[in-house]
Image (cartoon, rainbow, N blue to C red):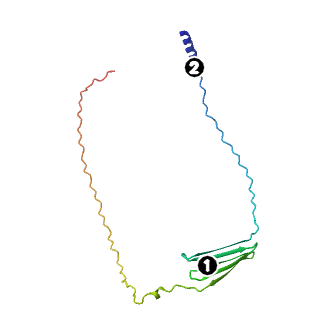
């Protein structure tokens, strides 16, 4: 049995001695190759639609915000006609009637009513009331005093000479010198 164990150990030693580990080589990567994509130029065609007849209208009346306007428009195949009406701040009504066709845009502007402006506030004032009188204040130059700065004062630090003791040397050797 000992012989067998020795024989196995000898063979293992011989195999281990002749075994050469695989040499490691870093993997080699090639740069990826990309082809330029080939696109066909898109073909855009202008889409034209035949004129369609339409008609719309709306109006807004809001008493809280004093908004009052109206708009109506209609179209056959080639001509657009319409009008809008707006109540202006001076209480007039502006009416615009327009027509748009192949020759361009034509508008007719009319005003209804008369401009009304609020009465002047002075006319409503009480005649017995007199405007307050204020005395104009006199200009006073600001009292600014430039600050005064004291020159900095530095004290020189007191230098004290350090006290050293001079070492006492002896001529007698305390240890024997080695002989060579």
The residue that disc 2 covers is 16
Residue at x 46%, y 87% (from the top left corner): 124
Pointer 2 local density, CA inside 10 Å: few below 14, some 14–19, many at least 20: few
Q: Which mark is residue 135?
A: none
Q: Position of residue 142 (x, y in %)?
A: 34, 74
Front residue of 27/66: it is 66
Q: Is residue 95 visible?
A: yes
- Dot 1: what SS? strand
Number of numbered markers: 2
Residue at x 61%, y 82% (from the top left corner): 93
Q: Is residue 119 left or right of residue 138?
A: right
Q: Earlier in the sequence, mark 2 or mark 1?
A: 2
* Quadrant, the N terminus: top right
The residue that disc 1 covers is 86
Q: Is residue 141 left or right of residue 10?
A: left
- Dot 2: what SS? helix
Q: Is residue 44 left or right of residue 117?
A: right
Q: Position of residue 63 (x, y in %)?
A: 55, 77
């Amino acid at each position: 049995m000992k012989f067998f164990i020795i024989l196995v150990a000898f063979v293992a030693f011989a195999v281990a001695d002749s075994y050469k580990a695989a040499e490691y080589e870093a993997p080699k990567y090639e740069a990826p190759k990309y082809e330029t994509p080939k696109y066909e130029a898109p073909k855009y065609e202008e889409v034209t639609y035949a004129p369609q007849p339409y008609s719309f209208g709306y109006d807004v009346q809001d008493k809280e915000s004093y908004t009052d306007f109206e708009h109506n428009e209609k179209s056959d195949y080639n001509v657009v006609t319409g009008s809008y009406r707006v109540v202006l701040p001076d209480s007039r009504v502006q009416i615009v009637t327009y027509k748009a066709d192949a020759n361009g845009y034509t508008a007719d502007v009319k005003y209804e009513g008369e401009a009304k402006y609020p009465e002047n506030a002075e006319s409503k004032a009480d005649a017995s009331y007199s405007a307050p009188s204020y005395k104009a204040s006199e200009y006073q130059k600001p009292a600014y005093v430039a600050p005064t700065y004291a020159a900095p004062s530095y004290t020189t630090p007191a230098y004290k000479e350090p006290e050293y003791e001079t070492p006492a040397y002896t001529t007698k050797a305390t240890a024997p010198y080695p002989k060579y």
